Amino acid sequence: MGSKVKTTFACTECGAQSPKWAGRCNECGDWNTLVEELVGGSDPADAPLAPSKRSGPVRIGDVSTSSARPVSTGIDELDTVLGGGLVAGSVTLLGGEPGIGKSTLLLQLAAARTGTTLYVSAEESAQQVRIRGERLGAMRPDLWLHAETSLPHVIRAIDETEPELVIIDSIQTIADPELSSAPGSVGQVRGCAHRLVTEAKDRNIAVVLVGHVTKEGSLAGPRVLEHVVDTVLQFEGDRHHALRLLRAVKHRFGPTNELGLFEMVGEGLVAVPDPSTMFLADRRTGVAGSAVVPTMEGKRPIVVELQALTTDSVPNVPSRRSAQGIDGGRLSMLMAVLGRRGRLPVGEQDVYASAAGGARLNEPGLDLGICLSVASAMCDTPLPADLAMFGEVGLGGEVRQVSHAQRRVTEAARLGFRRVVVPAKSPDPADELDGQVTLLRVNTLVEALRAAGLDASASGLRAV
Ligand code: TYD
Ligand code: MG
């Protein structure tokens, strides 16, 4: 690098190249998507395609997999999400809103694992990181700190310390002086990430990049980073709740459906061993609009409370559907099904539905709970305190089977629920639950409403 550097402009959406900057991409027509990039032999964007240290083709059976095995991070919840741990030579992006706990998690990772770690702090001074490290038990002799924002200096630090893990906190504050675009711009973020990916592969070290997420929820530099890394972890949660959820949204080395649950306490992030109890901690029984659902997060059943509130819509204004912690599109669809098939006049109601306790859920098994919580709110009739439910609701008003029915029932029973409304063809409860829990099998939403003690005629609501 360094001799003669040429630059070009590339569209972050379609990848089209242009010799000069323009407000709008000529190819795809998107606005404000052109970013400056280096071209020529030193173009970092070329690196993954033309790596210098890789050999030619090999027979699939001769490919060594020993270095692609995950190595435990020392943090169980993180290992669960990663399918075992971090893989040498891989790059992981940890995204999340500012203040959610990314730096805390990574410092704890540096404290918990074995092997040399280089923590590049591009946002906080080394003193600040040390003070936090003291609290988190990260005072290890093999943990190196480097408060630096310039990419070449970071690379030199990697040369000097020869770490097995490099943490870059954050990729948005690292800049390559050879790129003329401003630090934090898409071009810089992309260029630096490409370079670090190349370093990770060539040196066979694990690299973790911190990426701040914008208000809209996307990683700054629209999607560009997600393509170049091997794994994308999302760290989320409500800042006003202590609960933090970690999940993989892309993972080249394993499944993406596992969820890690942490609580932010004075000593940093601690695992939540019994999430169901935590999610139900503030539940009040006997309140209309509350429904309890054993949902699945990866292989783990978690019992959550869904809450709904309905109010009369303003006449001649489309009724509102507001979803928090559940999918808004799904809520709208379910309200249409509840109106047409369940014969409840939801069309004239504003509906507010949320997952209690800061949970963020997206799983078809929630459908029945969403419908019954709204119906309960509309009828102003609480669901029985010992009743839980799960099942997917189809457009025809049918209740469909969902995965892991037995595990869901077992988890609900463990928390004291005695009756569970389930899709008709669900398997019987596990033998050890004999007599402890009754399944109320339903084929349709109307049957589910009846099983839960709710329907338009029972509550005196006008049927549509
Ligand atoms: P931080 O890891 O700095 O967030 P990010 O890197 O994602 O911006 O964590 C920030 C919040 O976490 C901060 O508001 C204080 C809180 N916190 C604790 O409650 N306990 C702790 O032990 C630590 C280190 C942080
Ligand atoms: Mg931070």
Image (cartoon, rainbow, N blue to C red):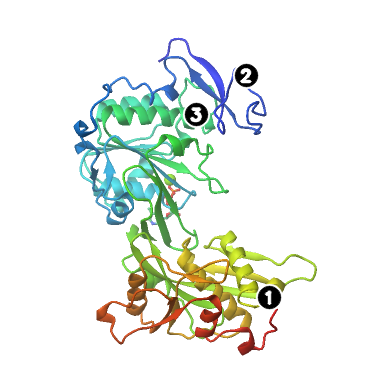
The quarter of the image holding the N terminus is top left
User: Would you call the spot at circle 2 few (<14 residues within 10 Å), some (14-19), or many (20 or more)?
Assistant: few
User: Residue 429: percent from the left, percent from the top?
Assistant: 32, 78
Q: Residue beneath label 2, please?
A: 20
Front in this rendered view, residue 144 or 72? 72
Mark 2 is on which residue type? Lys
Q: Amino acid at mark 3?
A: Gln
Label located before the other in sequence (2 or 1)? 2
Instruction: Say whether mark 1 is within 8 Å of ligand 1.
Output: no
Q: Are marks 2 and 3 in contact (CB under 8 Å)?
A: no
Badge 2 marks a residue whose secondary structure is loop
Label 3: which secondary element: helix
Say which of 276 and 301 sits in front: 301
Residue 429 shows in the view: yes
Dot placed on the residue nearer the N-terminal end, 1 or 3: 3
* Residue wearing tag 1: 311
x, y percent for residue 255: 34, 50
